[in-house]
Amino acid sequence: MKRFNLSDWALQHRSFVWFLMIVSVLAGALAYTGIGREEDPDFAIKTMIVSAALPGADVQQTLTQVTDRIEKKLSDLPELDYTESITRPGESIVYIELRPDTHAGELPRIWQQVRNMMADIRDEFPAEFAGFRFNDDFGDVFGNLYAFTSDGFTRREIRDYAEDVRRIVQQIEDAGKVELFGTREEVIYLEFDIDKLAALGLDQKQVQETLAAQNAILPSGVIDAGPERVLVRIGGDFTGTGSLLDVNLRVADRFFRLSDVASIRRDYADPPEDIFRFNGREAIGMAVGMRTGANILDFGAALTDVIEDARRSLPVGVEIHQVADQPQVVDHAVNHFLKALAEAVLIVLAVSFISLGWRAGLVVTTTVPLVLALTFVFMHYTGFTLQRVSLGALIIALGLLVDDAMIAIETMISRLEKGEGLTQAASYAWTSIAFPMLSGTLVTMAGFIPIGLNDSAAGEFTFSLFVVIAVSLLISWGVAVLFAPLLGVSFLPKTLRPHAEGGGIVRRTFHKVLRIGMTHRWVTIGLTVAAFGLSVYGMRFVEQQFFPNSDRPELIVDVRLPQNASITETQAQMDRLEAHLKDNPHVAYWTSYVGRTAPRFILAYDVLTPAQNTGQVVIQSKSVAARDALRTELQQIAREDFPGVDLFVKLLEIGPPVGRPVQYRLSGPDIDALRDHARDLAALVARDTRLTGVVLDWNEPVRVVAVDILHDRARQLGLTSRDIAATLYTIYDGVEVTELRDADHLIGIVARGDEEARRSVEALENLQLSTGPGGAIPLRAVANFRYETEQPVIHQRNRVPTITVQAALATGDQPATVVNDLAGTIAAFADTLPHGYHIAVGGSVEESAESQGPIARVVPLMTLIMLTLIMIQMQGFRLGFVVLCVAPLGLIGVVVALLSSGAPLGFVAILGVLALVGILIRNSIILVCEIEVLRGKGMDAWNAVFHASDSRARPILLTAAAASLALIPISRQIFWGPMAYAMMGGIIAGTLITLIFVPALYLAVFRVKRPSTSGHAGSGSSCG
């Protein structure tokens, strides 16, 4: 029975196959226009924040009564990786980090489970506990940021205009969350003169209750007056500051105006919770997100139209500035990659035409758009987008996907040179090399399995690399056996003259080297093994990297003051910093954030915990060169002009963010001892001249005035600790008494002490306390005062106090290099620590290890799959051994390429090195199978090895040339550069070595001797 031949079937159904090709191209073109665009691929941020409050508690009480209870309960969460907590007086913030292998689709269920767990322990907290707040939107991205500035308008008016624009933006079909920030709420302050209040015998609590009662919204009944019902309404609620000025307070039989004991003013929250500024001008920000799955370019165009309409409708003096434009960035990035893709296509086409001639080259080049088109169709219908990783994958795949077509056409040409007809030559490819090609394709795909099954955040980031390459390679095999034969019949001549016996100079040189390698087989094997051993040794000189920094022009400056710094001082320091940006030739514009950091305008953005001592400046430079020059300037300014202020000048990151790249976490039970050890560790790290900006994430204590109540004396005067604490809290922090209802705004009416009472530590002792009508005593009469220090914040990791020593790089060294060099010193220091204290490496080195761990776990599976595919094809242990020995030889070229270029071995480059294994095994399979085919036809083993190596050298070298040269366009890019160099070096060196090493190894394994005469029959295997 005749075996099915797909290539022969295609030739018998030519019209239908032409139809399939046309449909494929058209479908691919349509799919390309519909594929979503992104700058970087999405990855789930598996973090949730649980916040809780215990007003009035000190940091230790908050830690034991709130934070520890939360973390203890969360330890029962099955998907939990670890918790990190920040505890401040009265405030607890717990970050929940899930295991990397947690599926993104499970997050909603897990976050609801966290809420349920917190509800379960609600009754275990003290009576004063103020409840939980949950943030499971920590990873939400707001790709478009706008700043509203004004000249001659109040903040309230600007906010109203911003709200109007926000409502319009929310009506866009693909709009996601739209939030305003930097709004600074309006407040009416009642600033009491404490001495007058006490002298009049007025109790603050009574005053507050009087005001709240007058302004309350309460039902007052309905009169049922026979045929109709008449509503009764009570008036007198506050309508503004004027109505507050008219309030009278009664003491005994006397009345006092509220304005006699308090100044009343309508203002904005002071001090503000956070501040947003654009180019040094206070502004209101609007952050715009996009609906998941929407096309960012279409959304960006719709958003631009809405904002332009809004600009035209705003009064003169109100301006909208766009400070983050993700659609524009994506459009630029995708176009940049498409240009690189086009360059790679042209390179592959040039290699095909130059090496194969215009007819054969036309056949090979025609398969490229067919494979790309079908790949685009797959990407469109499975939800994959065009972004940095998927486009890079297409470029990497370009050189590989022409491999099958080249081999198929080369086989056709060889049969035509032997006198066969076009149809017979075209169908021969299926019977001779279709299945070795399929095995080689599957082995190449298997080389990318560690990417596809990597469950870390980095693996999720690069997942589309595996899918796109695997799909395109599989499609390329189908195109080679279904479409290429018909293209060959259509474009190749009916007959071809055989090549000259000796060939050109390149072929003759190869013959000479091949004969030497075969004759001196053990020398060839020994030299190859020695070169491989030398490359393994050379790996220690290759620097390691996680992910490179972004090549976007933004520059970020994180500002952190001592932990007791006020937001006023933070703003003052940032004013000084921003003065250096004004009129700087490198700066296009900048935005600054006081008390917080910027919204997550890209996914790989490190959002810091809000705090009064924290600030951030996001600078848009005019170019990457300007960014780098400005970075150097600001680093010098930070060292010289900002003593005591931590200014960290950084670039945006690609992949999961890590912050300062070199980090060590020191954990231990006793906080005071932990701080001492952390300072010693920081001093040790700071000795390395390659590091700069060595800081601790928490350390400095703050001053505290301890008020020890004399309870017996206080009770005699009718006072309690609660009364005194409430009075002090009202004076210093303020208490919201009631609210002014102004249109759709609620404006808090806040009672607090006047500025003199709030700002002076010395005034505390003389603070007057009311003891009833007409009575007042100073606070010092019922309390003693002590001045001490305490820790304002405590960081924990998995319920253990932890201080992180962080450092930036001052040189071009990679973090892994520095950490490896410091490993002995850090280990020696760790040995001196008491029991219960330990050091863990953090930063980019830890992230890299966590990302490479899943790779290592998947490598055995990858190896098993490759071995299985090899054995299915080879059907022999010795043949499989010959094929498999080629796998690691690409490392020789990888080491040479990385050391000569100075490129580091990053996460993506490691994936490329693993992929080399499959590429080289594929070439080896095709070569060894050809040897076995020739032996099966009666040729002796020696000549079969020689002639197979000769016949397969050209397609293997052409494929290597196409695969390596196609990587040139992305070798200039910061993300793909190291991988491109590694793969180019590995493919070139590995291929050249394979063509000499495999024949020598085959001869050695099968103990083949050089025959005295040629033509002796052999007993080759079927090779699958």
Image (cartoon, helix red, strand yellow):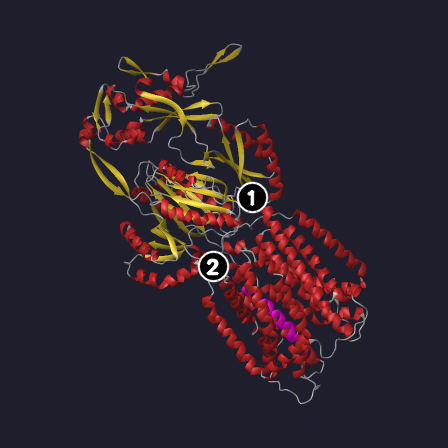
Please identify the dominant SS of the magenta region.
helix
Numbered disc 2: secondary structure: loop
Q: Report which residue position mark 1 lands on.
A: 326
Amino acid type at circle 1 is Gln
Number of disc labels: 2
Q: Is residue 353 above or below residue 715?
A: below
Q: Is 709 in front, or is 763?
A: 763
Q: Is residue 930 visible?
A: no
Q: Position of residue 745 (x, y in %)?
A: 47, 26
Location of residue 832 by image quarter: bottom left
**How far apart in space, not on screen, are marks 1 and 2 (Cα)?**
27 Å
Q: Is 109 in front, or is 1015?
A: 1015
Residue 70 in magenta stretch: no
Q: At x 51% / y 33%, what residue is drawn? A: 148
**Which mark sits nearer the N-terminus, 1 or 2?**
1
Q: Report which residue position mark 2 lands on.
A: 545
Q: At x 41% / y 19%, what residue is drawn? A: 238
Q: At x 46% / y 71%, what residue is drawn? A: 537
Q: Is 390 in front, or is 679?
A: 679
